[in-house]
């Protein structure tokens, strides 16, 4: 069949599904790479990230054995890399659910081919994020004291603390994302079961498919549940980063105590989340030859979202500084002044460059559609968002109320090692995912194909004539 | 003490049958006391409870510690036989119940595991017995030659019994000589009186009646004998209600006293003298006295011709002094030459201050002439080969002696040298015999305060390492039988008191202080000697160039406290430096030399030179570089050893040193991040004139702001603390007291530099005004125990919560260490255990901690508790006596030790309490009031009293 | 003995026509199978609306209730202590946890409800024995009629399938499932 069948729908100027594939060759093209043995390049990459994950493990053990003092933290900067990275990862973890849930609710066709991918990314990002709040504790082995369980002392968690809110928000977010992801995965696992050649694979996939057989009675429950999960996941996504922002907004520190934080953090999360999706999907679609399902159209739309969220973040920066000036609060004014001109000013300006200046390129179609360019931009945005968290957390602590207790912060090699280490952990999980789970929602693509087929008939009846 | 213990450590060289049996008995006896916490061989466990001891209750004993050779009365708190805390003895005039950091830290010195533990002979372990035998043999030999070859080198001491012993030694060995040397001896003041009165006198100041105080380079609030008493008297006169005094300070480097001046003028140390002369001349004019001959005044004028004098409003100060005749005092600093002290004494004469603000009493320290001269004579004796046996009980002379004496090498030329000290140090390496010294808290002895008050030193614990006292060391020289320190001290007072002994002795021990009646002396002055000296001075040209100024250190004094980690980690009251000293330069001089803080410079004094990092100190005199003594010791190698630049001809300062960059940098280790308040209302001060206006303004910084929550009400006790910034001098005694009382850990320079100071109570020091002529203000900051504490609502595990009496309580064993509370504490008073700071203690160190305070484990937050253990102790005592806790029952550690009594703690619900008075005082304000944290700790604005004429 | 009469077609539109016809017969329990949710399939098979939404709603409300009650109980009643001078029950501060627990419960109950309603998970089903049925998750569409009563004659169903051009298979299961 000839590729690139033109569609008149003005909303869909570029095909979200190239060609007119049959269900069979959709299945073929989307699944067969899973049955091909992993190539040399894959194994090299895997060993690399797996090694980094090892570094993470080793340094975590070192930290727990010797004491949190091996990190660079001090008084007043009692939070630093640990919390920065936590917020960074959590933020990244927002794109997945957002893409799947919100775009599903808005019935955005183009979401179909990237949601699985993005959801997986969410899960792994949240796993990485979850490590930090535990590691950064003075006594990590007592982390479970933050959960309300009946202990001998009968003391309970203190529910006014934003950290307890965090515990509930993050664990809920992880659970719901996992369910959402798995529910969406069931039909494809069944497909895997049915196309798998070796009985061993058949059995394993069979177990995870839970006996799915595409019954219409199941589909209708499945559909209802899937949409509902999307429905509750949407406010959840927003709530999670709102709660994370409460960690700072409910504090009294100048530079933290700000009402703009919740929306500003959520926007930032989506911003960085989309950026990482881009960073990963651009190479992935090439390696796994998914260009015909993940078309330039998807990438361009995502670039538009990044441009928009980028502006929301910029607005956040603006408000912070405006309010500091407008309120005339000497403490807050000084913190902002210190951000622009103080010890960490380079980080601040790097943040402005990456998050505000660079995305403006996406006003131009050529930028939005150039793979290399958008990939570089997505990397820069992730750098920028890390800087943002650094600026918010460190510079506020570093220059608070009493000048006598001001002090600067310098990370140690352990701080940096653990940060790089979590990237390894993320990579490891992600490669395993690509190896064993269909990275694109096969069933949904088939559904999409049918929809497009109907549209095609509707727009061009002559084509359907024999 | 049974003789058994004496012989236990090792068998003597000659073990006779008797010793052998004794030792075996001991071995048998001690086989059963493995569980006993005391070091091996020290004691047997009680077989029945001693009458006066209840396990779990502290027992207090009066004793004393030496300070500049004088006695400071102390009360030692012991728990189950271990001293755990020292407080000032309220009945002792030199303490008045208060203590400085030096005394507070003594506990750490006592339990220092690095203390010398064994007698050394030529570096080889030996038994004390063999040393005794050797001493007795030597004593016999020396007896034959009338002690021709015998020399003593000792710290100048006020101890009556020691002085008596030395006298007896001098009688028994007429040809022997005793020299006293201490790098910090206050001999200049003695020689000043000698210059004016013809004989040496103890100069005792009394600031109670002083309206105007002029300090010529005198740091009388901290590094001087009787500084505790002087600080109390000074502070009592700082509050507006008590007719505030006025303090003028002329000094080289910024000192604690300088920080508290109403008018401070900076001048090179060498320029202080001319300023003094000029002041006398001006005073003669202002008072219109005819006591001074015109020729003398002329000489004064001639001698005071230096540009430095021009920069100071001498006339104004003189007029102010003249207005306060008999109610003023002029004090010259120990660093200044005798001439300046004589001039100061002369001014006090002219102002009729004698017997009012200054008294002359018999000299307490038996010490002749200048320290360097005495040591110089010893050096000459050694070079002439006259010294055969040299007994040294002085502070590490090889380290602290003027460098040109090269004492280390010279000791090698003495056939027999005996040295005793707490630590094996530079001197011990150069001596034949080294005998571990008993710590003051392990010793029997006695000391005299400046005003003559005697305190008996009684041990709070058996010597931990079989240390000996000077008495025991000298005893063999005059075999009067009974070699133990107790016998010797008791013996002395038996002599003194004759029949009264049995009644007086117990009293003395219990009270810790008794005064021998004596008449204040009224020496008559003559300016003749002065005039000749001044002529001589006038003939000298005004010296130009960079001056090297050496100072006593506010923390390790002259280095004798350098081994004490408590004092090393204590931040200097002025520079806020810890773990070392620095080369202090004025901003202008630093600019001229193009050096920044942290740049290492080489200081060259003739052929001697040292390297030190630069610290740019606002208010330091230009063209002068200050180094504090006492650092870079063997075994405490922190900072720069300034003694390497100290020569016998210029002990304290010399003009004409050269400075050059070493081309490297060093980290200045300080817990304070920033030097100014950035215009924020934090540590507030005003002048007497501006006070009324300030009161109305402060009203807005005290009333609680509105809140949406319904607030909690505190029936019963409502603990609170008030800190009077008018009184606080910044001496930092409270910081150490708090750290010792609450078992604070020492984290070392690395962690301090990283910002991991563990002190619950810190003293912030801020500069205001210009960098050249700053005004300084200090502010103690500890947990404010906010009623609406920001730290509490962010803790996820309820680890920091409020007690029903309003204490902000930290529950260590519930804390998981999120450190959120510290982030949210606007005062940043919370401290975190980044590592296992409390672990890995030697058995000796394990005896130190206060059993009433938890040792914090790794990974938990900690902070000031308002000394909750003391509150509970008071509660128990009150309950036992069936009464309520009364005002004054609870004294926090910081409050109890504060020489300025700037800290008051108590029950805010008790209308009669002192703290309530201050709470209602219109000088009170809340720190960071706008945050509405409702702190229980309040501050009283500092009131300065500048001279309107000069302002 | 249970019989499954299975008709297989190759595209979605056909599947819907077949489903409509077979459902009209009203014999046995009719079900359809497709690799993805085919629009209109449910109506053709005359399947009622799913009850999952109600379960989710119930779960959500329960979760929120439990959430707030938990906080009231633990901080306000079981261990009341003065924290930062705030009221024991600081309702505004309790909102986030209340919300999160509501979401968590609704999600979990929804998933459980889905499993129960569609009586999953299971590893085996009689239809897995039908030759070619594995393509139900790939690219084929099936309509099945489940006959529990051995007396019922399957012939009309088979005829109906054949008229509509569906390939017919019959699966017989001995066990009662």
Image (spheres, rainbow, N blue to C red):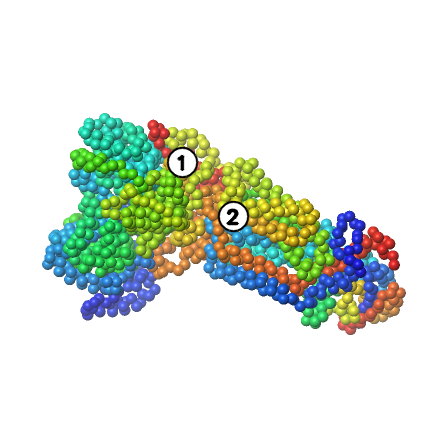
Q: Is residue A273 visible?
A: no
Q: Residue at x 22, y 40 (%)?
A: B338
Is disc 1 surrounded by few (<14), some (14 to 19) or many (20+) residues within 10 Å? Answer: few
Q: Quadrant of residue B130?
A: bottom left
* Mark number displayed over residue A394: 2
Q: Is residue C128 left or right of residue B442?
A: right
Q: Is residue B460 left or right of residue B367?
A: right
Q: Residue at x 75, y 56 (%)?
A: A17
Could you say which is closer to the camera, residue B843 or residue B329?
B329
Image location of residue B54, percent across then percent down:
33, 55
Q: Residue at x 63, y 66 (%)?
A: A40
Instruction: Name the residue tied to disc 1.
Output: B770
Image location of residue A247, percent across then percent down:
56, 48
Real-space CA distance between mark 2 and mark 1, rounded to the nearest whole angstrom: 31 Å
Seen in the picture, residue C102 relative to A316 is either above or below; the reply is below
Q: Residue at x 30, y 29 (%)?
A: B316
Seen in the picture, residue B93 relative to A173 is either above or below; the reply is above
Give the quarter of the figure containing the C terminus of chain B: top left
Numbered marks: total: 2
What is the chain letter for disc 2? A
Cβ–Cβ below 8 Å for labels 2 and 1? Answer: no
Helix, strand or loop at disc 2?
helix
Q: Quadrant of residue A175?
A: bottom right
Helix, strand or loop at disc 1?
loop
Q: Residue furthest bottom?
A: C174
Could you say which is closer to the camera, residue B807 or residue B55?
B807
Seen in the picture, residue B372 relative to B705 is either above or below; the reply is below
């Amino acid at each position: 069949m000839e590729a690139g069948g033109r569609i008149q729908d003005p909303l869909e100027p570029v095909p979200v599904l190239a060609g007119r594939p049959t269900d069979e060759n959709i299945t073929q093209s989307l699944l067969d790479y899973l049955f091909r043995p992993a190539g040399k390049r894959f194994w090299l990459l895997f060993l690399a990230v797996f090694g980094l994950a090892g570094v993470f493990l080793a340094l975590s053990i070192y930290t727990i054995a010797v004491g949190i003092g091996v990190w660079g933290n001090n008084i007043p900067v009692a939070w630093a890399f640990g919390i920065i990275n936590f917020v960074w990862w959590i933020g990244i973890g927002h794109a997945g659910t957002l893409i799947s849930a919100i775009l599903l609710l808005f019935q955005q066709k183009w979401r179909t081919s990237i949601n699985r991918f993005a959801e997986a990314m969410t899960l792994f990002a949240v796993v990485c994020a979850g490590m930090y709040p535990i590691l950064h504790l003075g006594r990590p082995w007592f982390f479970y004291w933050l959960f309300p369980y009946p202990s001998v002392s009968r003391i309970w968690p203190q529910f006014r603390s934003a950290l307890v809110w965090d515990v509930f928000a993050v664990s809920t977010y992880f659970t719901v994302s996992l369910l959402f992801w798995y529910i969406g995965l069931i039909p494809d696992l069944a497909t895997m079961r049915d196309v798998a050649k070796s009985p061993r694979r058949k059995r394993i996939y069979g177990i995870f498919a839970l006996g799915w057989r595409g019954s219409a009675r199941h589909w209708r429950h499945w559909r209802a549940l899937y949409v509902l999960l999307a429905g509750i996941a949407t406010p959840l996504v927003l709530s999670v980063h709102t709660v994370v922002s409460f960690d700072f907004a409910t504090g009294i520190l100048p530079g933290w105590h700000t009402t703009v934080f919740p929306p500003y953090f959520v926007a930032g999360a989506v911003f960085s989340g989309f950026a990482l999706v881009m960073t990963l999907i651009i190479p992935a679609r090439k390696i796994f030859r998914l260009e015909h399902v993940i078309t330039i159209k998807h990438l361009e739309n995502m670039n538009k979202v990044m441009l928009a969220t980028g502006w929301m973040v910029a607005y956040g920066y603006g408000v912070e500084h405006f309010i500091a000036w407008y309120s005339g609060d000497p403490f807050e004014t000084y913190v902002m002044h210190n951000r622009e001109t103080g010890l960490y000013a380079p980080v601040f300006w790097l943040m402005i460059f990456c998050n505000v200046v660079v995305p403006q390129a996406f006003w131009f179609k050529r930028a939005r559609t150039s793979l290399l360019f958008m990939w570089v931009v997505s990397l820069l945005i992730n750098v920028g968002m890390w800087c943002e968290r650094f600026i918010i957390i460190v510079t506020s602590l570093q220059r608070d109320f009493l000048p006598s207790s001001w002090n600067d912060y310098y990370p140690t090699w352990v701080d940096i090692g653990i940060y790089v280490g979590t990237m390894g952990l993320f990579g490891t999980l992600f490669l395993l995912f690509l190896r064993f789970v269909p990275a694109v929602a096969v069933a949904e693509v088939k559904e999409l194909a049918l929809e497009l087929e109907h549209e095609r008939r509707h727009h061009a009846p002559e084509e359907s004539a024999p | 003490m049974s003789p058994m213990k004496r012989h236990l450590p090792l068998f003597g060289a000659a073990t006779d049958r008797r010793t052998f049996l004794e030792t075996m008995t001991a071995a048998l006896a001690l086989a059963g006391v493995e569980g006993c916490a005391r070091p091996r061989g020290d004691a047997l466990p009680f077989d029945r409870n001693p009458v006066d001891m209840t396990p779990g209750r502290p027992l207090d004993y009066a004793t004393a510690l030496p300070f500049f050779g004088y006695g400071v009365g102390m009360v030692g708190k012991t728990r189950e036989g271990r001293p755990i805390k020292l407080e000032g003895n309220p009945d002792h005039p030199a303490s008045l119940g208060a203590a400085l950091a030096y005394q507070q830290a003594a506990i750490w010195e006592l339990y220092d595991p690095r203390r010398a533990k064994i007698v050394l002979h030529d570096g080889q372990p030996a038994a004390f017995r063999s040393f005794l035998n050797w001493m007795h043999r030597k004593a016999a030999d020396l007896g034959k030659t009338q002690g021709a070859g015998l020399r003593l080198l000792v710290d100048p001491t006020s101890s009556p019994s020691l002085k008596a012993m030395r006298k007896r030694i001098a009688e028994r060995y007429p040809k022997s000589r005793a020299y006293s040397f201490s790098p910090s001896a206050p001999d200049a003041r003695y020689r000043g009186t000698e210059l004016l009165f013809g004989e040496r006198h103890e100069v005792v100041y009394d600031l109670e009646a002083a309206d105007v105080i002029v300090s010529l380079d005198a740091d009388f609030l901290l590094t001087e004998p009787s500084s505790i008493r002087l600080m109390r008297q000074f502070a009592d006169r700082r509050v507006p209600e008590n007719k505030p005094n006025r303090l003028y300070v002329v000094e080289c480097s910024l000192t604690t006293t300088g920080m508290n001046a109403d008018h401070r003028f900076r001048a090179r140390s060498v320029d202080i003298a001319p300023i003094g002369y000029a002041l006398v001349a001006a005073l003669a004019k202002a008072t219109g006295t005819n006591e001074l001959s015109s020729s003398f005044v002329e000489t004064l004028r001639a001698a005071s011709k230096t540009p430095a004098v021009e920069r100071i409003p001498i006339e104004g100060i003189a007029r102010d002094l003249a207005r306060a005749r008999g109610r003023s005092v002029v004090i010259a600093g120990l660093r200044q030459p005798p001439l300046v002290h004589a001039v100061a004494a002369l001014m006090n004469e002219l102002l009729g201050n004698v017997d009012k603000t200054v008294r002359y009493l018999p000299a307490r320290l038996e010490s002749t002439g200048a320290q360097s001269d005495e040591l110089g004579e010893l050096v000459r004796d050694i070079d002439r080969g006259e010294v055969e046996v040299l007994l040294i009980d002085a502070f590490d002379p090889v380290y602290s002696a003027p460098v040109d004496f090269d004492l280390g090498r010279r000791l090698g030329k003495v056939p027999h040298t005996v040295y005793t000290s707490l630590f094996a140090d530079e001197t011990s390496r150069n001596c034949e015999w080294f005998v571990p010294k008993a710590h003051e808290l392990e010793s029997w002895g006695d000391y005299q305060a400046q005003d003559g008050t005697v305190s008996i030193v009684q041990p709070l614990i058996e010597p931990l390492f079989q240390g000996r006292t000077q008495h025991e060391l000298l005893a063999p020289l005059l075999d009067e039988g009974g070699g133990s320190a107790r016998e010797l001290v008791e013996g002395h007072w038996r002599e003194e008191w004759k029949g009264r002994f049995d009644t007086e002795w117990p009293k003395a021990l219990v009270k810790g202080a008794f005064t021998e009646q004596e008449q204040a002396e009224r020496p008559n002055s003559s300016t003749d000697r002065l005039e000749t000296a001044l002529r001589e001075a006038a003939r000298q040209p005004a010296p130009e160039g960079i001056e090297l100024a050496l100072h006593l250190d506010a923390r390790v004094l002259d280095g004798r406290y350098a081994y004490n980690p408590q004092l090393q980690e204590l931040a200097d009251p002025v520079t806020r430096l810890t773990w070392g000293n620095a080369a202090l330069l004025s901003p202008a001089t630093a600019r001229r030399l193009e050096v920044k803080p942290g740049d290492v410079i080489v200081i060259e004094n003739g052929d001697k030179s040292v390297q030190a990092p630069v610290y740019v100190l606002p208010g330091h005199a230009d063209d002068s570089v200050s180094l504090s003594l006492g650092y870079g010791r063997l075994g405490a190698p922190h900072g720069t050893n300034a003694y390497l630049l100290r020569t016998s001809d210029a002990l304290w300062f010399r003009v004409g040193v050269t400075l050059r960059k070493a081309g490297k940098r060093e980290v200045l280790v300080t817990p304070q991040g920033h030097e100014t308040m950035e215009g924020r209302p934090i540590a507030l001060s005003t002048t007497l004139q501006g006070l009324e206006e300030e009161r109305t303004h402060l009203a807005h910084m005290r009333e609680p702001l509105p809140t949406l929550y319904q607030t909690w009400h505190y029936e019963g006790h409502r603990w609170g603390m008030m800190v009077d910034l008018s009184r606080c001098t910044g001496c930092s005694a409270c910081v150490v007291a708090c750290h010792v009382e609450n078992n604070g850990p020492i984290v070392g320079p690395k962690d301090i530099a990283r910002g991991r100071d563990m002190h619950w109570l810190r003293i912030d020091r801020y500069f205001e005004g210009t960098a050249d002529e700053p005004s300084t203000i200090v502010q103690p900051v500890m947990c404010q125990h906010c009623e609406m504490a920001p730290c509490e609502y962010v803790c996820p595990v309820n680890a920091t919560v409020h007690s029903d009496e309003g204490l902000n309580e930290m529950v260590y064993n519930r804390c998981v260490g999120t450190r959120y509370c510290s982030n949210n504490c606007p005062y940043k008073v919370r401290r975190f255990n980044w590592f296992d700071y409390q672990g890995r203690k030697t058995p000796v160190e394990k005896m130190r901690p206060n059993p009433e305070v938890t040792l914090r484990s790794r990974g938990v937050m900690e902070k000031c508790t308002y000394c909750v253990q003391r509150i509970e102790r008071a509660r128990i005592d009150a309950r036992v006596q069936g009464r309520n806790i009364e005002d004054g029952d609870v004294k926090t550690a910081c409050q109890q030790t504060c020489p300025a009594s700037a800290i008051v703690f108590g029950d805010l619900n008790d209308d009669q309490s002192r703290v309530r008075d201050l709470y209602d005082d219109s000088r009170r304000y809340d720190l960071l009031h706008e945050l509405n944290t409702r702190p229980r700790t309040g501050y009283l604005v500092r009131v300065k009293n500048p001279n309107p004429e000069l302002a | 003995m249970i019989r499954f009469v299975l008709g297989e077609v190759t595209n979605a539109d056909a599947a819907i026509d077949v489903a409509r016809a077979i459902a009209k017969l009203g014999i046995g329990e009719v079900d359809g199978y497709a690799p993805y949710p085919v629009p209109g399939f449910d109506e053709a098979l005359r399947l009622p609306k799913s009850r999952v939404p109600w379960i989710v709603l119930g779960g959500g409300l329960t979760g929120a209730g439990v959430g707030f009650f938990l906080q009231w109980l633990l901080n306000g009643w079981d261990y009341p202590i003065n924290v930062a001078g705030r009221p024991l029950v600081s309702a505004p501060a309790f909102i986030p946890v209340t919300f999160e627990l509501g979401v968590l419960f609704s999600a979990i109950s929804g998933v459980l409800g889905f499993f129960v309603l569609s009586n999953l998970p299971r590893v085996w089903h009689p239809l897995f024995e039908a030759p070619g049925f594995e393509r139900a998750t790939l690219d084929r569409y099936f309509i099945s009629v489940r006959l529990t009563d051995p007396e019922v004659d399957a012939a009309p169903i088979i005829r109906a399938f054949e008229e509509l051009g569906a390939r017919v298979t019959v699966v017989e299961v001995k066990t009662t499932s």
